[in-house]
Image (tube, rainbow, N blue to C red):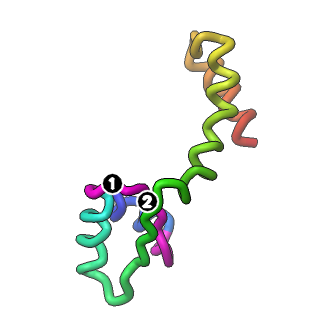
Amino acid sequence: FFEKAIAHNGTPETVTIDKSGSNLAALDAVNADRETPIKVRQSKYLNNIIEQDHRAIKRRTRQMLGFKKFRCARILLGGIEV
């Protein structure tokens, strides 16, 4: 996953992850092949800003009890992204 993300978006200076051991092991494997290693910040709460962004979508879809058709989901999510 990290290799694919780096290939599409470029190499980050730092990566913030939660306390998951599997993510840390994957980033250690990625850093083993690189000249300049990616800094890893492990904190349970530093990722909360990103996670809170999903609340608006949950608030809108709960009222509709989920998306009934793919077309409706595409339109609504496109409006949220704009």
Would you place residue 30 above or below residue 68 in this image? below
Q: Secondary structure at mark 1?
A: loop
Quadrant of the rendered image containing residue 81: top right
Q: Amino acid at mark 1?
A: Ser
Would you place residue 37 above or below residue 24 in this image? below
Residue at figure coordinates x 33%, y 89% from the top left: 35
Q: 15 or 48, which lies in front?
A: 48
Give percent across and percent down for residue 57: 65, 30
- At label 2, counting other C-alpha atoms closer than 10 Å, the crowd grade (few under 14, some 14-19, many 20 or more) is some
**Left or right position of 46 against 1:** right
Q: Which mark is residue 20?
A: 1
Residue at figure coordinates x 50%, y 78% from the top left: 13
Of all residues, the one furthest to the bottom in this rendering is 35
Give percent across and percent down for residue 52: 63, 43
Rounded to the nearest whole Å, what is the CA distance between mark 2 and mark 1?
Answer: 7 Å
Q: Are marks 2 and 1 in contact (CB under 8 Å)?
A: yes
Please state the extent of the stretch shown in magenta in the rendering.
10-22
Q: Amino acid at mark 2?
A: Ile
| Position of the C terminus by quadrant | top right
Residue at figure coordinates x 30%, y 77% from the top left: 31
Q: Which residue is mark 2?
A: 17
Residue at figure coordinates x 28%, y 57% from the top left: 21
Would you place residue 50 above or below residue 33 in this image? above
Give percent across and percent down for residue 8: 46, 63
Q: Secondary structure at mark 2?
A: strand
**Left or right position of 7 against 70:** left
Quadrant of the rendered image containing residue 20: bottom left
**Left or right position of 19 against 28:** right
